[in-house]
Image (cartoon, grey):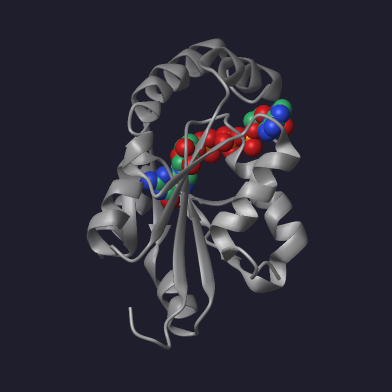
């Protein structure tokens, strides 16, 4: 990326670790200094989720059409659903010099490492697998079988933490948020 370009930051980590919670808090504090990409997915919306806010909810056919058109910066199949980062918005923001955050799973994070080596990649880890499972359960958004599937994927994702530029353990939320601010903005430059 050239001198006028913005920055791409990837936030990854297993489902239920608190990525969404941390990014929401980061936006509450620094919303005018960053952009968070809105992904597309074939997953059904959870009760509170709104098309165009949490995700763009597509049918598999529509997602695959977009995929064939090369509309995704990265994409992955996760627990039976497709997820992808729409390329145009991210590219526009980067070319306008903005700081752009992607909240994506491991396969997508690996694709970004290949296609945008300048991207800074942050891994959010839970204090333990048991805590992660508790958080997934306490969220009341997935069935037991989906929770089991997500915990199984989490084991693989946790084994890949060392691939990232830094790891933040989300135990105490405020502490983790402070570490995320430092990782995203750099020491001394938190707006
Ligand atoms: P993700 O986006 O990574 O799937 P969420 O942000 O939805 O995870 O968080 C999963 C659950 O864990 C939510 O119910 C959230 O309120 C809770 N949570 C997040 N961070 C913490 C934390 N540091 N301590 C306790 N609970 C947390
Ligand atoms: P959820 O169904 O809990 O919203 O998301 C499941 C997983 O998909 C999470 O790890 C989340 O970070 C990831 N995810 C969300 N959007 C994208 C995306 O655009 N690309 C990829 N690769 N993963 C995504």
Task: Check the image and name the residue furthest to the front.
Answer: 188
Q: Is residue 146 above or below residue 166?
A: above
Residue at 68%, 21% in the rendered image: 140
Judge by depth and name the residue closer to the eye, 36 or 88.
36
Give the quarter the ligand 1 occupies.
Answer: top right
Residue at 56%, 60% in the rendered image: 184
User: At which x and y percent is residue 154?
Assistant: 42, 24
Judge by depth and name the residue closer to the eye, 171 or 82.
171
Numbered disc total: 0
Q: Quadrant of residue 188?
A: bottom right
User: At which x and y percent is residue 169?
Assistant: 57, 34
Q: Is residue 131 above or below residue 49?
A: above
Screen quadrant of the C terminus: bottom right
Judge by depth and name the residue closer to the eye, 111 or 183.
183
Instruction: Name the side, left or right, on which 62 lies relative to 110.
Output: right
> Residue 94, can we see it?
yes
Judge by depth and name the residue closer to the eye, 63 or 118.
118
Residue at 69%, 55% in the rendered image: 26
Residue at 39%, 50% in the rendered image: 165
User: At which x and y percent is residue 189?
Assistant: 64, 70
Screen quadrant of the N terminus: bottom left
Instruction: Name the side, left or right, on which 158 lies relative to 29.
Output: left
User: At which x and y percent is residue 124?
Assistant: 52, 38
Instruction: Name the side, left or right, on which 8 lies relative to 18.
Output: left
Task: Check the image and name the residue furthest to the bottom.
Answer: 4
Q: Is residue 57 above or below residue 140?
A: below
Q: Is residue 142 above or below residue 187?
A: above
> Residue 58, can we see it?
no
């Amino acid at each position: 990326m050239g001198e006028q370009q913005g920055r791409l930051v990837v936030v990854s980590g297993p489902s239920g670790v608190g990525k969404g919670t941390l990014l929401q808090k980061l936006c509450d504090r620094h919303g005018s200094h960053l952009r968070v990409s809105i992904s597309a997915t074939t997953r059904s919306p959870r009760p509170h989720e709104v098309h165009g806010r949490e995700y763009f909810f597509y049918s598999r056919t529509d997602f695959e059409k977009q995929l064939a058109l090369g509309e995704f910066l990265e994409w992955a199949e996760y627990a039976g659903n497709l997820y992808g980062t729409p390329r145009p918005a991210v590219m526009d923001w980067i070319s306008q010099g903005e700081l752009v955050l992607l909240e994506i799973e491991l396969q997508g994070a690996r694709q970004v490492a290949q296609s945008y080596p300048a991207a800074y990649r942050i891994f959010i880890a839970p204090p333990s697998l048991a805590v992660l499972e508790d958080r997934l359960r306490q969220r009341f958004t997935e069935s037991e079988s989906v929770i089991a599937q997500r915990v199984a994927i989490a084991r693989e994702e946790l084994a890949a933490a060392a691939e990232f530029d830094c790891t933040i353990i989300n135990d105490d939320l405020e502490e983790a948020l402070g570490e995320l601010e430092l990782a995203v903005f750099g020491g001394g430059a938190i707006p």
